[in-house]
Amino acid sequence: MSEREALFSKKNLKLLSDPLNSSNPITVQVLGICSALAVTAQMKPAIVMALSVTAVVALANVIISLLRNTIPNRIRIIVQLVVIAALVILVDQVLKAYVYDVSKQLSVFVGLIITNCILMGRLEAFALGNKPWQSFLDGIGNGAGYGAILIIVGFFRELLGSGSIYGFRVIPESWYITHGGFYANNGMMILPPMALITIGIIIWVQRSRNRKLIEN
Amino acid sequence: MENLINIFVKSIFIENMIFAYFLGMCSYLAVSKSVKTATGLGIAVIFVLGITLPVNYLLEKYVLTEGALKWLDPSFASVDLSFLSFIMFIAVIASITQLVEMVVEKFTPVLYNQLGIFLPLIAVNCAILGGSLFMQQKAFLNIGEATVYALGSGVGWFLAIVGIAAIREKIQYSQIPAPLRGLGIAFIITGLMGIAFMGFMGIKL
């Protein structure tokens, strides 16, 4: 057996930092868009969603990685789904108990974490072939990469659409036309299509800075 | 009858799975490079939604909701299994896709060759689980409404994926800024299609 790897060796840190940029789950691997967009009209649900997904990815990665040598290959998808579904039920119950209003706002999208492609994607591509600790870091990294995009999208949609950030008013009331000012919110930003366009623009910005990612 | 048509039209245009809820985006973006494969996947989604949603409806009505087990024994009237719904729904979906795959392979090999690779993928398509979760939220009165909702959502998804596949085939010849090529432009087109679909909002039958 080779020498024990340090807990935070360079390779392990790379597992954490790569998904934030050059292998971001949303903008590069195209995973987990399903639930990413619907919850970003405001920042609070976006942050709760990001934390929930990070917790589920990290734990599911660890569990599958521990079981990786005992799962028969033919039924691995069912096993993965059961592990994920169990974790999502836990997350759902915790959200209902502690942040009930946000959980109502997220509605079906908590349940949809089960079919979030990030989970299956990371389990298949990483956890089935790596040790638990690395899988854990990979899960945290990918959850953070997903969360970063969610929060950026949520920030712009809430700022431009409702004039607030995380529920706090940023643009003063007196600026609004209804109060005799000059400013009106862009109501489009709250609506679903603008989430897609915002992500499109994020991808544009990211790829023009990181030219390796450009598709032909 | 009127009610059913209302649900059908609403689920295709107004509450479109892709443009209003972003469900099934992963396969939507991955499999929309040619119209032919997009059509195959779209039909498979209609098919699987139309089968799994009524099954999940029965499961919800007779097993999972509070007091649903009363038909088994009056003493079960206070049992509430609704916290199990996620795991039950996904189990039903995964096993039915397997079953459908086997049945289709056995009886209609032609259809199987067309749908073949897509069927297993569908188990983890958010649109399918999403359909069941919305069904739970909307509390349909009977199984007919649930089935019509399933078919409508499926058709809406089908329209969306065939539409974007056609557009993506065309824009291959366009001059798009390099960093926007591929994924970026697909997102923006979907957004614009979503804005177009918003025109249906507020229609009441």
Image: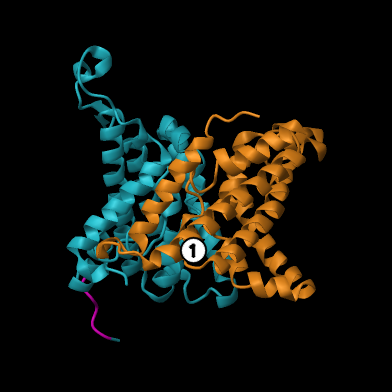
Chain colours: A cyan, B orange
Give A151 or B182, whichever is nearer the viewer.
B182
At x 20% / y 61%, what residue is drawn?
A208
Q: Position of residue B25 (x, y in %)?
A: 47, 55
Residue B163 painted magenta: no
At x 47% / y 63%, what residue is drawn?
A120
Q: Is residue A70 above or below residue A184?
A: below
Question: What segment carries the magenta color?
Answer: A2-6
Q: Is residue B5 above or below residue A170?
A: below
Asked which secondary structure carries label 1, the reply is loop
Q: Is residue B96 above or below residue A97?
A: below
Residue A3 painted magenta: yes
Give A215 or A206, whichever is nearer the viewer.
A215
In which quadrant of the rendered view does residue A124 lie? Answer: bottom left
Q: Amino acid at mark 1?
A: Ser
Instruction: Please give the chain letter of the residue carrying mark 1.
Output: B
**Split into 4 quadrants, where in the image is the C terminus of chain A?**
bottom left
Q: Position of residue A178 (x, y in %)?
A: 28, 15
In which quadrant of the rendered view does residue A5 lie? Answer: bottom left
Q: Position of residue A85 (x, y in %)?
A: 53, 54
- Is residue B84 at all visible to an observer of this figure? no
Q: Tell which residue pokes out farthest to the top in this image.
A: A180
- Is residue B130 at all visible to an observer of this figure? yes
Mark 1 nearby-residue class (10 Å; few <14, some 14–19, many ≥20): many
Give the residue at mark 1: B32
Magenta stretch: dominant secondary structure: loop
